[in-house]
């Protein structure tokens, strides 16, 4: 292998963190993006090569990826960038990673599974906090409950958001939530499923959301009923309901323009000193047909630092020949213990299950 890794969207907040971490690795890293002066400035600062390319130019993409082993896509919205980049990776035999948590991107990427297997490349969306941490957690708790029937994953609401995260979250606003029932993806109205989880400081109300885990965890564990939740107090749940009510309007061009305008005035991302104090907490519970449950809690550093380490580590594993062709999920390829190799992660099996309840809202 040539040991070349290209970060597309490297001038963005998380892309820069990934590029910075790659710089200290043994691979040859290359930064890329659409804006010439930003790419050139970052390349000069890091002392690496820079390439100016647009995701909507197939010829330019193929030329840029011709000598690349692994592409890390850090350019949101991923629903727009991922398809063209994956297709170019197939043509150039380049492994594809990205850091999205957008469910539609995983559904799209899965359609390239057969083509990726034929080309001998791996396609792995979600080489980030979500899905790496949650996928490893899901596989671990599933192993504790043979023949598990239900899997539920929840995330404690983080305090830190980047500009890109804000834009992606609003762009995915919807009036319905995706869940998996009996092996099939289906949807329920926003707010219909609510549940409490103990993130380490007592039970907290959480509401079902559309995360990629309803797709990836099924692929990794085979559990046929999956729900994903986000910790949300009363005010947050109310705001979530309001957002669902205007979700269709938010997809219109004027609303998209407004979202971009609001995002442009937000800080690009949290400062390093803030990231150092932030922790992410995930909980997973598996349940069998006899309602026997096991619970596992995972604590990680802030999502942005974790994502930079995870994406870099997976790219390095690929360069060492540790990959599986086709569409893949992190835990399916690297195992549930992958997450514990990252600095600052801690996994706890809760042998005395906390009480939890769910409500089906009418």
Image (cartoon, rainbow, N blue to C red):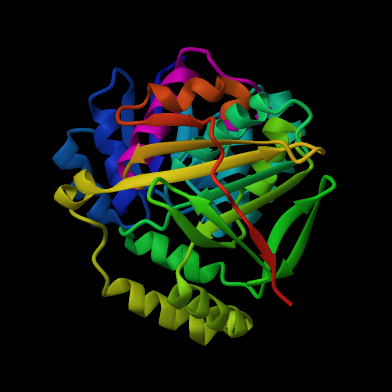
Residue in view at x 47 percent, y 29 percent: 70
Image quadrant occupied by the C terminus = bottom right
| Location of residue 352 by image quarter | top right
User: Does residue 317 appear anywhere in the picture?
Assistant: yes
Nearest to the observer: residue 216 or residue 67: 216
Q: Is residue 96 magenta?
A: no
Going 47% across and 44% down the picture, which residue do you hit?
A: 282
Is residue 100 left or right of 276 when viewed as pictured?
Answer: right
Answer above or below: position of 334 versus 288: above
- Residue found at x 24% / y 29%: 23
Q: Residue 113 sits in which quadrant?
A: top right
As displayed, is residue 249 above or below residue 92? Answer: below
Residue 326 belongs to the span the image colors magenta: yes
Instruction: Give x and y (percent) for residue 55.
Output: 50, 53
Side of 175 where 186 appears, left or right: right
Residue 358 coordinates in the image, percent (x, y): 65, 60
The percent position of residue 110, horizontal first and vertical second, equals 71, 41
Is residue 122 visible from the viewing direction of this image? no
Which SS type dominates the magenta stretch?
helix
- Return the x and y of residue 215 as percentages of the image width and height: 69, 45
Residue beneath the point at 71% across and 47% down: 226
Camera-side residue: 343 or 142?
A: 142
In the image, which residues are magenta?
304-330
Decide which of 97, 330 is in the foreground and name it: 330
Q: Which residue occupies the foreground of this view, 191 or 129?
A: 191
């Amino acid at each position: 292998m040539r040991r070349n890794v290209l970060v597309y969207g490297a001038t963005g907040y998380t892309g820069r963190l990934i590029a910075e971490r790659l710089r200290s690795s043994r691979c040859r890293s290359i930064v890329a993006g659409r804006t010439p002066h930003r790419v050139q400035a970052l390349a000069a600062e890091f002392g690496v090569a820079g390439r100016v390319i647009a995701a909507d130019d197939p010829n330019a993409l193929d030329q840029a990826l011709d000598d690349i082993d692994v592409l890390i896509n850090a350019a949101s919205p991923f629903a727009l960038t991922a398809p063209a980049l994956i297709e170019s990776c197939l043509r150039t035999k380049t492994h594809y990673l990205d850091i999205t948590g957008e469910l539609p991107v995983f559904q799209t990427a899965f359609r390239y599974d057969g083509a990726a297997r034929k080309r001998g490349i791996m396609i792995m969306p979600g080489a980030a906090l979500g899905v790496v941490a949650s996928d490893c957690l899901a596989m671990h708790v599933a192993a504790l409950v043979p023949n598990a029937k239900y899997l539920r994953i929840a995330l404690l609401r983080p305090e830190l958001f980047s500009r890109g995260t804000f834009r992606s979250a609003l762009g995915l606003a919807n009036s319905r939530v995706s869940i998996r029932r009996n092996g099939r993806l289906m949807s329920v109205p926003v707010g219909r499923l609510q549940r409490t989880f103990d993130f380490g400081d007592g039970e907290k109300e959480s509401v079902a959301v559309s995360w990629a885990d309803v797709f990836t965890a099924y692929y990794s564990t085979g559990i046929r009923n999956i729900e994903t939740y986000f910790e949300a107090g009363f005010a947050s749940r109310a705001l979530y309901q309001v957002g669902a009510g205007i979700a269709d309007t938010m997809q219109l061009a004027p609303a998209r323009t407004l979202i971009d305008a609001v995002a442009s005035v937000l800080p690009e991302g949290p400062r390093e000193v803030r990231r150092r104090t932030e922790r992410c907490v995930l909980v997973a519970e598996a349940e069998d047909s006899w309602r026997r449950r096991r619970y596992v809690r995972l604590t990680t550093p802030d999502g942005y630092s974790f994502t930079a380490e995870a994406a870099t580590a997976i790219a390095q594993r690929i360069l060492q020949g540790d990959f599986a062709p086709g569409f893949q999920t992190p835990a399916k390829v690297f195992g549930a213990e992958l997450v514990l190799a990252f600095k600052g992660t801690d996994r706890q099996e809760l042998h005395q299950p906390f009480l939890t309840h769910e409500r089906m809202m009418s």
